[in-house]
Image (cartoon, rainbow, N blue to C red):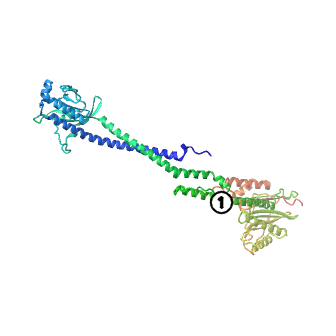
Amino acid sequence: MEKTSFTKSLAFKTILRLVIIVAVLSLIGAAVIGAISYANLTAQLRDYVYEAAIKGTAVASASEYDEGEVKIDDYLATGKTDNAYQAVFLNLLLINDDYELQRCDIFVPYEDHFTYLMSSDDQTPGESLKKESPYYGAEKDYVAKAMKASVDTELNPEKSTKENVYTENIKDGIKLSTYYTPVYDKSGKAVAVFAASYSNDKIYKTVFGLIAELIGMSFAVMLVSVLIFYFSIRRHVIKPVSKLTASVRTMKESVKNRQTVTTDIRTGDEIEELAVSFEEMNRDLIGYIDENEKITAEKQRIDTELSLATGIQAGMLPDKFPAFPDRKDFDIYASMKPAKEVGGDFYDFFLIDENRLGIVMADVSGKGVPAALFMMHSKILLKSYTLMKQTPKAALEEVNRQICEHNPEEMFVTVWLGVLDLRTGVFTAANAGHEKPAVKQADGSFELFKDKHGIMVGYMDGVRFKEYELRLTKGAKLFLYTDGVAEATNANEELFGTDRMIDALRTAEDKTPREILAAVDAAVDEFVGDAPQFDDLTMLCIEYNGDCQA
């Protein structure tokens, strides 16, 4: 058998699952950490930019420098700068560089616009002086709040108003985070605004850089973990499983040759337990196959013997019809369908002399081989004593005595035994616990004949049986059967019953005995359907045609 490809192996599937799990967890972890980092960095940045804004306010609010007095109104009125202006501008550039700001500006706000004093974007002092600019978005509101704010230069969170003077907007295509703080004159009045702006792109770069580092570290850890896991699972799982798989593939040959497979797997875990279980299963399987071969051989022997027993039993029953082709005074037909290979039902008919016909219908308790053996013993006794020209009553009593003498299994048999005088049509009969016969006289239909019943043969020693006579008119018919007919059961556990049996008999009552039995058999089969046959099905029918020799 070809070796399993790596893409179909346990190692590949396990590693693939591990890679997917680690990758997903790494991405989730990076996203969570990135979000937390973004929030923390944003908060830190706001403090950072606010600090820059406070310093800018302090620089711009200084009324005098060594270079002279700061005169905001004069700068706006004349558009000219001086040394004090240049000192403020220099400090503005220093703050911008020290805090790595995108830009910082000082301007004077008006109703619908503001006018620049200076900007860190200026190449030379005074370059943007007196330039006007409209407000962007909600910038006007924040500028108004800044002009009214009291700035905490010590950055005391409890006193700071920085939340009220912070906004985010876009200028020149760049998203900026900006703080607006007031610039005071020497009298303490807010006369201008200092704006410190930081580019959000730097935040994103920092956060994304951190996420990239986290993902890189995660995948590095994943790679190391996968390698460690792979070599570990290869040693402790894949190799033992491969050995176990190879052992399984050799099981058929090992069982055929009666050789126990040894896996030699010692991993100290569930795989070793599985290997030990496999070895035990292999040994048990060899034992089961040996035992099964013995049982099969024994079963074949029993089947052969049962087949022979079936043939022997069938050979003991009259099965050639017409049974008496030279006799015109009667016609007889019988059949027996066993529920198993051999049955306990039996019938018999035989001429005692030229003018008398003996008929037996019997049903042994139980089924199978024991019933068949008991049936053959009973049949021989019944025929023997009847042929000795004993009456049915006397024959049953003698057979009962002999069976009771040697009946350790306490089996019994129900028997209807009758002797027909072919000259007169008179049946002398005795019923030992058997089913009532069905009789059709020449001018009537089939009816159950309520005869005198006695106890079963073999049930109790010393029993006395009752005998009665039944006269058949010319053209009359007698139907005998075992309880397998009336007690045939369908899938709904309903019994066929004697009423249905009589109905079936009446459908063919004017026909030959063979056709009558065929009609009853067909009715039973139709009623039972697919349900299994529960009991032996045995029937006999005789038609009396009168004394044709007279």
Residue located farthest toward the bottom when viewing the structure as drawn = 462
Which quadrant is the C terminus positioned in?
Answer: bottom right
For residue 96, side relative to residue 9 (left or right) = left
Residue 213: percent from left, percent from top: 37, 41
Q: Position of residue 165 (x, y in %)?
A: 21, 37
Q: Secondary structure at mark 1?
A: helix
Residue situated in front as seen by the camera: 330 or 417: 417
Q: Amino acid at mark 1?
A: Gly
Q: Is residue 45 left or right of residue 489?
A: left
Q: Label 1: how many residues lie within 10 Å, few (<14), some (14-19) or many (20+)?
A: some
Measured from the top left, where is residue 476 in percent x and y?
A: 80, 59
- Is any part of residue 4 visible from this angle? yes
Relative to 137, residue 315 above or below: below
Q: Is residue 494 visible?
A: no
User: Which of the 4 image quadrants contains residue 358?
Assistant: bottom right
Nearer to us in this view, 484 or 209:
209
Residue holding disc 1: 287
- The image quadrant that residue 122 belongs to is top left
Q: Total label count? A: 1
Q: Residue furthest front?
A: 66
Taking the image as shown, residue 275 lies to the left or right of residue 508, namely left
* Occupied quadrant, residue 31: top left
Q: Residue at x 14, y 28 (%)?
A: 83
Residue reaching furthest right?
Answer: 550
Q: Nearer the viewer, residue 106 or 379?
A: 106
Residue 151 sits above or below residue 383 on the image: above
Q: Nearer the viewer, residue 401 or 549?
A: 401
Q: Position of residue 310 (x, y in %)?
A: 77, 60
